[in-house]
Amino acid sequence: GAGVSQSPSNKVTEKGKDVELRCDPISGHTALYWYRQSLGQGLEFLIYFQGNSAPDKSGLPSDRFSAERTGGSVSTLTIQRTQQEDSAVYLCASSLGTGTDTQYFGPGTRLTVL
Amino acid sequence: GDSVTQMEGPVTLSEEAFLTINCTYTATGYPSLFWYVQYPGEGLQLLLKATKADDKGSNKGFEATYRKETTSFHLEKGSVQVSDSAVYFCALSDRNSGYSTLTFGKGTMLLVSP
């Protein structure tokens, strides 16, 4: 079956603009995660959705970052008033449940803020 | 908080050489431990995992043993191939996150020459 997909694959934006990144998880996976991969910080957890529970937002770096998950499936990560330090690869992953279930990662969206 | 420390790369080897990539961790309680691999131009893939002390994870000739006494999860392979060239990430999840979100090391690049 299809894996995790993300769009766009690349996004170039100007400082101060808002961007939306999309993630389509594997069908039937109840858990969805966003991570950020940057040169200076490595891979960092951002936010986690599990079913209909309130999301775990403990990794979001500032209030400019938000995410939603509609209908328990597709998720959108929004970054408002982008800054140059937001430049990174944003990775989405999904898993069947939680615990030790394997997380399957998408190919990522490379965001460049000029 | 949780943390994962990996040896810095790049690790440069000739084909058929023995590989060790060191990984140590700091976590609360008994974390689950993972190795992920990122091949050039591709997304993260789970390579192997171990969920309790003394467990050995293995896949594609790679092995890692969960050592609680040394808080380590070193990755080994007896004979590397050019196709193993990639970035390897050690990661953990623990009860603080409901064994859900992953904490990653900074990654170790492996370069294998013919």
Image (spheres, coloured by chain):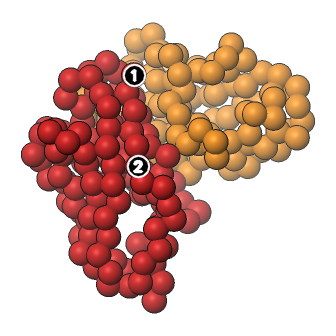
Chain colours: A orange, B red
Specify the quadrant that holds the N terminus of chain B: top left
Element assignment for label 1: loop
Judging depth in this view, the residue of A102 and A38 nearest the camera is A38
In the image, residue B44 sits, relative to residue A78, either above or below, namely below
Which residue in the structure is indicated by mark 2?
B6
Q: Is residue B71 left or right of residue A22?
A: left
Picture residue at 45% right of the left edge, 89% below the top:
B114
| CA distance for labels 1 and 2 | 17 Å
Which residue in the structure is indicated by mark 1?
B1
Quadrant in the rendering for residue A75:
top right
Rendered location of residue A69, percent (x, y)? 54, 22
Rendered location of residue B105, percent (x, y)? 44, 43
**Farthest residue in the front direction?**
B70
- Amino acid at the residue labelled 2: Gln
Disc with the residue nearer the chain's start (1 vs 2) = 1
Chain of the residue displaying label 1: B
Q: Is residue B35 left or right of residue A60?
A: left
- Amino acid at the residue labelled 1: Gly
Rendered location of residue A80, percent (x, y)? 78, 21
Picture residue at 32% right of the left edge, 31% below the top:
B26
